[in-house]
Image (spheres, grey):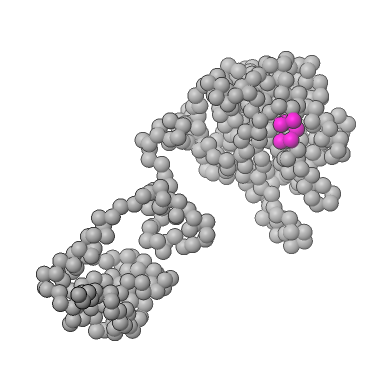
Amino acid sequence: MTEKLWPADNVIRRKVASLVPYARNSRTHSPEQVDQIAASIKEWGFTTPILVDADGQIIAGHGRLLAAQKLGLDEVPAMTATGWTDAQKKAYVIADNKLALNAGWDNALLAVEIKDLGDMGFDLSLTGFDAGELADLFKAPDEEKYADGVAGNMAANYGVPPFSVLDTRQGNWVKRKAAWRSLIGDNGESREHTLGAEGGMLSGMNNGVSLLDPVLAEIIVSWFGMAGGVAVDPFAGDTVFGFVAGTLGMTFEGIELRKEQAELNQARCTAADLPCTYYNDTSENIDAYIENDSADLIFSCPPYADLEVYSNDPRDLSTMAHDDFFKVYKGILQSTYRKLKNDRFAVIVMGEVRGKDGAYIGTIPKTIELMEEIGFVYYNEIVLINPAGTLPLRAGKSMSATRKVGKMHQNVLVFLKGSAKAAVAQLGDISLNFEATDEN
């Protein structure tokens, strides 16, 4: 038995000028779609021949013809439908388009493929999806349940999506940070002549002074603390965490070595009638002030070794050689384990520091090691992206001279004492909606 030949069995090149569009073709092609087809042909070549009848009239491929004309092609691949009735040709003009439209998408798999293409640096417009469609593909439906069972927009539940990267450059973050700064009034006055002052090493961050980001403090209290609980900071070098924790309903206790800073912090919180207590002492004496098993949240931003020197006091970690820094740092960090209740979280904000040889001294891995050594579980890592500040002015020179990249992030290390499930049950639901509270 002789098999019937298909049009695709015989593909030849035909002159573009010889092809005749079907006058009653009901499928339309906008200029934008023709541009897409043309771009596809430029990227991959002709992958689907134009289908014509014996007289050269197009049955399928009108859009490809228009794209070929736009590209100035002289010839295109074509195949001929021989022996078709007029009814078959008319019907296929419609069926060729409609059958493709009847297909659907597995959006989950599509999103995976699109993400992979994006990671490869491929021009996603060549897929035929526009920017709006791609955005919709990766946007969770408003009424869909998330994996944690909370319906609605994540930002409406958690302030910002609870991802491992937090970007402080986003508009809502910047606006909220300014509002907190205005409310707190801490502009780093007691840190004059430190490296965070104007022109110093950290001057590109937080408007020239190395202050804790209040929006980060708000997020940490909301995600890992609890209203009515006790928050403890063994390195309470500014007013921010105490003020934010007190405002959000936590009782705050902090230790600060510099007398003028401790008094300033206390005065600000007292003026706002917040339940905050700042103790003026070295954090090595934490046992004299904070009871064991009393804290519901440990949150602190310790000195980044000697990156920013805060005082001339030899007890100040920022004045110590790196070996001495880590010895004292270990004792203070590990003391927080005794102070924290079981089934609670400890959060440490830390940045990496370079030694005199230009290599990192390992503040991040050593912090993790010290916390795990005493019994904490290393539970979450969050990268906090900071504004570039003056970094663009310095990064090129550093890269050219030493191949060092400019650093514009901090590490937020989250540790767990006890059971996460029990902690969640005791801390309660998270409710942090920046938009709703901004209106107030």
Check the image and name the residue furthest to the front. 1
> Residue 288: in sight, yes or no?
yes
Position of 28 with respect to 123 (left or right) is: left
Magenta stretch, main secondary structure, is helix
Quarter location, residue 399: bottom right
What is the x, y in percent for residue 271? 65, 19
What is the x, y in percent for residue 80? 23, 78
Q: Residue at x 43, y 47 (%)?
A: 138
Front residue of this view, candidates 376 and 215: 376
Question: Magenta segment, which residues?
Answer: 368-373
Judge whether 95 appears above or below 191 on screen: below
Front residue of this view, candidates 17 and 244: 17
What is the x, y in percent for residue 31? 31, 67
Q: Residue at x 61, y 39 (%)?
A: 382
Quarter location, residue 250: top right
Front residue of this view, candidates 257 and 93: 93
In this rendering, the count of numbered labels is 0
Q: Residue at x 80, y 27 (%)?
A: 331
Position of 95 with respect to 141 (left or right) is: left
* Residue 371 part of the magenta-drawn span: yes
Q: Residue at x 11, y 73 (%)?
A: 86
Which quadrant does the N terminus fall into?
Answer: bottom left
What is the x, y in percent for residue 233? 70, 25
* Residue 307 part of the magenta-drawn span: no
> Residue 214: in sight, yes or no?
no
Position of 166 with respect to 46 (left or right) is: right
